[in-house]
Image (tube, grey):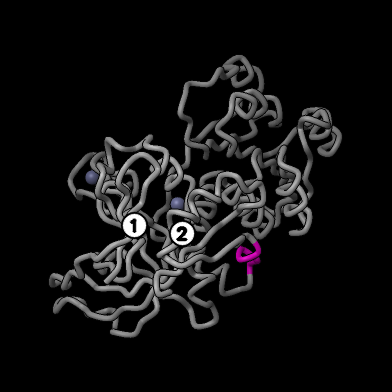
Amino acid sequence: MRAAYYKGQKHFSVSEGQEKAPRPTEAKIRVAYCGICGTDLHIYHGKMDARTGHNRITGHECSGEIVELGRDVTDFRVGDRVVVRPLASCGDCPACAAGHSHICHNLNFMGVDSEGAFQEYWTVPAKLLHRVPEKISLKQAALAEPLAVACHDVRLGEVKAGEYVVVLGGGPIGLLVALVARERGARVLVSEINSYRLGLARELGLEAANPKEQDLVQLVKRESGTAGADVVFEVTGTEAGAELMTQLPKTRGRIVVVAIYSFRPTVDLFGFFWRELHVCGARVYEAEDFEESLRLLAEGLAADTLISGVHPLGDLQATFEHLEADPRAMKTLIDCRA
Ligand SMILES: [Zn+2]
Ligand SMILES: [Zn+2]
């Protein structure tokens, strides 16, 4: 079978890989589609070499079909269409003991810390599988992972019907957060500086504004009858986002930090004190978020509008090279069967 190996310094090599027979509690998946995530771009740039090394099969947003099962797996069958929740936890650290195994202290994020899905066949623990509902295509199902991120974020943000939500950052995760929040009955404003992404947000029926052209603080004040936003999601990972996030919420409003910051931004703690703001971090997802994600996809949530390209596994290198130069790139999928 073919597999793509990250070799360091912006280089992938697609070559012959080893198929692995499933151990008793594992399943072997024929990978269909695997999305390229922001994390994969960080890996490509060598920023995660300490975790990946220079011979790692990456990729963690996949859909596929079970081709072989370990002898102890009873709740799945060969031929089942599935997605993988790529988080292997240790089971005995304090986070696992407290029921937060998704942020296990010794978390193995598959596709980063161990081998991932940019290959034809991927063998994984069966307990990490979720069955794909019939209505959903395997292409749509490849969005289950990023959509599960958004479900987790919105769940931790406790978004309720009728609330006014501001999402800072209109990339794939930001727009998915906006769609899920709207699904909860919230009114949603997306803040984004890329004009293509602004247009896409509006195409999805979301309100959208460019904070470089409009005073976002004034806009949110006006749109909320001076109160401010109920919930703000910070998805930009920028200094500007960290600056804005404390200026937008209402009294006792919530801020959900979704972005992965690669530096320590300046945060206005006085803003928290003055309005008694609440902040929470939201990292990856739990099993229930994956189930919710698949349910929303089956109900027709337009997540696949974000798919901006599908490329064969053999073109992985060229796909990464083009991705960065393309302002219209949203969610790119790799077809591991092509
Ligand atoms: Zn991802
Ligand atoms: Zn653990």
Q: Which mark is residue 86?
A: 1
Asked whether residue 6 appears in the rendered view, the answer is yes
Asked if residue 13 is positioned above or below residue 190 in the image, the reply reads below
- Residue at horizontal 46 percent and vertical 64 percent from the top: 334
Which stretch did the figure color magenta? 301-305
- Residue at horizontal 43 percent and vertical 74 percent from the top: 338
Where does residue 138 sit, x and y in percent of width and height? Answer: 48, 75
- Residue at horizontal 71 percent and vertical 41 percent from the top: 194
Asked whether residue 97 appears in the rendered view, the answer is no
Q: Which mark is residue 145?
A: 2
Secondary structure mostly taken by the magenta-highlighted segment of the chain: helix
Q: For the residue labelled by badge 2, is the local secondary structure a helix, a strand or a loop?
A: helix
Question: Does the CB distance between marks 1 and 2 fall below 8 Å?
Answer: yes
Q: Amino acid at mark 1?
A: Pro
- Residue at horizontal 75 percent and vertical 50 percent from the top: 187
How many marks overall? 2
